[in-house]
Image (cartoon, helix red, strand yellow):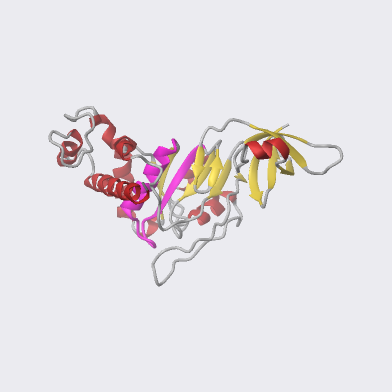
Amino acid sequence: MKGRIIKNQNGYFSIIGEAGELHLCRSRGRLKRMTDVLVGDLVEYELPKASSEAVITHVCERRSLLCRPLVANVDRIVLTSAVRMPDVNRYTLDKMILLAEDAGLDILLCFNKADLASAEAETLRQDYEKVGYPAVCTSTFDGRGLEALAAALRGHIIAFSGPSGVGKSSLLNHFLGRTVFESGSISRRTGRGKNTTRHAELIPFGEDSFLMDTPGYTALALDTIHPENVGYLFRDFRPYLSQCRFTDCMHLKEPDCAVRAAVARGDILSSRYQSYCQALQEIRENRTKYY
């Protein structure tokens, strides 16, 4: 029998089978020693007659791996930012995009709470669609963008990711039609959201669709990314990478740099280039610290 791991609590896995049936199981014996079983894994399992618990016999090959939290086979990640409360931070957003690109995930940008600053939300959407990322402006207050976002969720395993307090849980609860995820509040002291998501769990959303929230964060580690790969992971840099004079150009101070020329012409957003420089510096500092 085949099924999808949708939850892991203290080593007990919940599996949803091909007919929608739910089973509780544990990973045992040789399989447990050989591999970790993750939420999102497609597995083969058996139902022994002498036990009410299913037994996982095989973990199928994974298509993708999300690292925070560890979740397998995510098809698309919805990188969610609030336009206001908390205010969007373009560097944080670009770091989220950088990590999603490095993981090879399909990316959709969601600019939530758009009712609080409609013009700014639209500017963000236009800016990032020019970069090459589909984007939607949403609001659970006035309903804008919710139909378009719902259409993008069907038929996929979708992870919502973003800082605490941007409204991920509220969006998910809206689509599921019930309160599944706890909505956080904004700290008066820091102006940041308070984390409410504690573990990874896939929630069925129609046929062959699953939704999940991920823990919010205030910092993102870029320690898995090599400095020489950063330029390629900025999608808007790619058309210009082969036009630099030096093949190992880092797009900082090198002469005849096509990326910097594109920034000067306005073909690459200056904010994106600033994010690139900041991310590169952060990665280099981390590598110096640990190596």
Toward the viewer: 10 or 41? 10
Q: Position of residue 201 (x, y in %)?
A: 60, 49
Q: Position of residue 241 (x, y in %)?
A: 24, 31
Toward the viewer: 36 or 75? 36
The answer to which quarter of the image holds residue 237 is: top left
The number of callouts visible is: 0
Task: Left or right? Give the position of 221 relative to 130.
Answer: right
Q: Position of residue 154 (x, y in %)?
A: 54, 38
Q: Residue furthest front?
A: 291
Task: Left or right? Give the position of 47 relative to 65.
Answer: right
Instruction: Determine if the magenta segment contains residue 18.
Output: no
Q: Is residue 224 at all visible to an observer of this figure?
A: yes
Q: Which residues are magenta?
A: 75-104
Location of the N terminus (image quadrant): top right
Toward the viewer: 153 or 5? 5
Toward the viewer: 280 or 171? 280
Task: Left or right? Give the position of 120 relative to 197.
Answer: left
Q: Position of residue 71 (x, y in %)?
A: 55, 43
Task: Left or right? Give the position of 65 relative to 20.
Answer: left
Report the residue at 44% width, 52% height from top. Answer: 162
